[in-house]
Image (cartoon, rainbow, N blue to C red):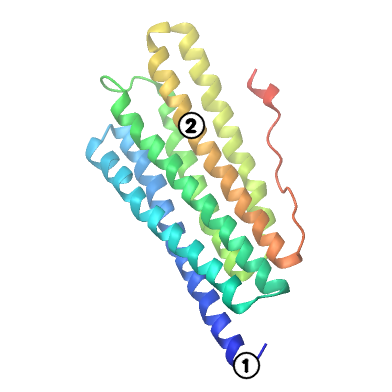
Amino acid sequence: MSGQSRGVLDREMHSVQDDLLRLAGMVEQAVEGAVRAMVGLDEVLARQIAADDANVNALRFKIEEACLALIATQQPAAGDLRAIVAAMNIVSDLERMADHAAGIARTVFNIAGPWSLEPLTGFPRMAELTRDMLRRAMRAYVDRDAAKAHKVAEDDDQIDDLYLQVFGELVSVMIEDPAKTSQSLKLLFAAHNLERIGDRITNIAERVVFIASGEMQELNPEPDETRLL
């Protein structure tokens, strides 16, 4: 590859990286806003989260198109190709996280009256942890740092533990007061969305390891389903 071609490739890949970071910031805001809207039953904020999802989708398509153009016109090899393929996977996971956030926000429109369930207290903590993991995963991506990526994946266990805690609390609520079953199920759906966001951040960490080493590794397997019983 000539020096001129190398320069073009580097500039275009840096542009993709910048867009990925911008998309991650949008997702982080969506997660925080979705949980805040749900806990406070804020319909205005929930509608904003849903509307902003269109911007997430538009940026996702821009990034994917840029990656495909790089493959078609620059013929990247080895580490460059890994980085481009990883970026296409990362952007897909980020877009799905935004979908999960929108699902949490929609809970506001599916509940009649105020929440009356204590497990709500676990949601802000789950949201805080996922946002922190996302920031650190994207930093690992920028730094091409496999060790940081491994640490992010390990921390997903905290999200899983909180999910199991909320799950158990909601099951107890439904057993003790069947009248709260509808609310409990809606909260279970929201908690599952947060847990899935943690899983998708782990996917990003796996892509960072792939960029750095050329190997795909499952960094944090799914928890044993029997722990929910």
Is 1 placed left or right of 55 in the picture? Answer: right
Task: Name the residue at the bottom extreme.
Answer: 3
What residue type is disc 1 on? Gly
Closest to the camera, between mark 1 and mark 2, is: 1
Residue on which the image places disc 2? 191
| Up/down of 162 relative to 112, above or below | below
Residue 1 falls left or right of residue 129: right
Please, what secondary structure does the residue beneath circle 2 have? helix
The local secondary structure at tag 1 comes to helix
| Residue 35 versus residue 164 in the image, above or below | below
> Would residue 146 be visible to someone looking at this image?
no
**Residue 86 to residue 115: above or below:** below
Look at the numbered discs 1 and 2 and tell me whether their residues touch, using CB distance below 8 Å: no
Residue 115 percent coordinates (x, y): 32, 23
Q: CA distance from mark 1 to mark 2?
A: 50 Å
87, 73: nearer the viewer:
73
Instruction: Name the residue: 35% across, 55% down.
Output: 55
Packing grade of label 1 (10 A; few <14, some 14-19, many >=20) is: few
Inspect this view and state whether residue 106 appears: yes
Q: Amino acid at mark 2?
A: Ala
Q: Residue furthest front?
A: 72
Write the residue at 46% across / 27% down: 189
Residue at image mark 1: 3
**Mark sitting on residue 137:** none
Query: Dividing the picture into quarters, in which one does residue 185 lie?
Result: top left
Q: Count the marks: how many?
A: 2
Q: Residue at x 56, y 64 (%)?
A: 139
Furthest-left residue in view? 44
